[in-house]
Image (cartoon, rainbow, N blue to C red):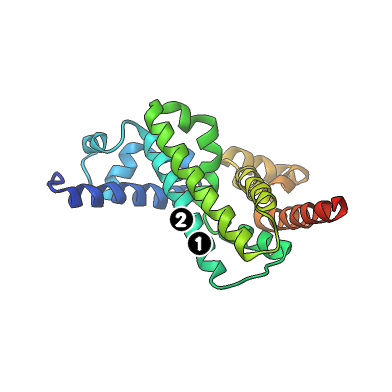
Amino acid sequence: MKQRARSAQDKQQRFQALLDAAERLALEQGGVRFLTVAAVTERAGLHRTGVRRYFANKEEMLLELAERGWGQWRDRIEQRLGQQTDLTPIDVADIATGTITSMSVFCDLLTHVTLSLEGSVDIERARRFKTNAFAAFDDIVKRLSQASVMTPEQVQEIMGMTTMLAASFWQASHPTPTLAELYRQEPKWGHVALDFGPRLKRLLRAAAVGLTQQRADTD
């Protein structure tokens, strides 16, 4: 018999267990679009009605997972940077690419946050997500600008581009079963489903170099 969480620590553990279960299932099933609350609670070992104590709906659960992802991305960048200094624009682009492409579910969620998740929760929950996501983004920009030859404004632009391109490329490279079959039948259309990592790196490298060159030309 599944037990209710009694202490604050128990509740936090079950809260994290639900997020962990959602992330694992999304990885196994090819994306968050296929998740159901019932499957997540079953994987977490909780009673399906108990999830309402933690999240109002599936969208709030996924928004929480996206918020956690922002913090994890910031931490991964920090780990990659270590004590490095004087990084080139290409170095910055490669760090952005390498860290975000290692977070498949986060890339997937970046699309859904904009399309539906933020609009499916109450305003205070949306405010908390925005506050924490922007705080993580600002931390990333500050840390990368300190460790590189790029200005904070240039880093801000390249990291904003990273999130937009990663979201789009991830969706294209992880087609639905219907589209996957269509691409198998029509290979000429399948180029859009190529692995998104190399394309993301090429474009971010070009953008990072271009931003710094633009400044040099202006100066």
Count of numbered circles in the view: 2
Q: Where is residue 147 in the image (x, y as percent from the top left)?
A: 62, 65
Q: Is residue 91 left or right of residue 127?
A: right
State the residue lying farthest toward the front.
219
- Label 2 Cα crowd, 10 Å radius (few <14 / some 14-19 / many 20+): some
Q: Residue 34 carries which label?
A: none
- Specify the amino acid type for callout 1: Arg
- Residue 131 is drawn in which quadrant? top left
Q: Do the residues labelled 2 and 1 touch (CB within 8 Å)?
A: yes
Q: Which of 81 and 121 is in front in this view?
A: 81
Q: Where is residue 213 in the image (x, y as percent from the top left)?
A: 83, 56
State the residue lying farthest toward the bottom.
83
In the rendered view, tell whether residue 55 sits above or below residue 103: above
Q: Position of residue 113 (x, y in %)?
A: 50, 36
Q: Position of residue 34 (x, y in %)?
A: 45, 39
Q: Is residue 92 left or right of residue 70?
A: right
Q: Distance between the residues labelled 2 and 1?
A: 6 Å
Give the SS element for disc 2: helix
Circle 2 residue = 72
Q: In this view, does 102 lie to the left or right of 132?
A: right
Give the SS element for disc 1: helix
Res. 43 in view: no
- Specify the amino acid type for callout 2: Gln
Q: Residue 76 carries which label?
A: 1
User: What residue appears at the point 59 percent right and 38 percent down from the top-left corner?
Assistant: 178
User: What residue appears at the point 47 percent right and 42 percent down from the top-left corner?
Assistant: 32
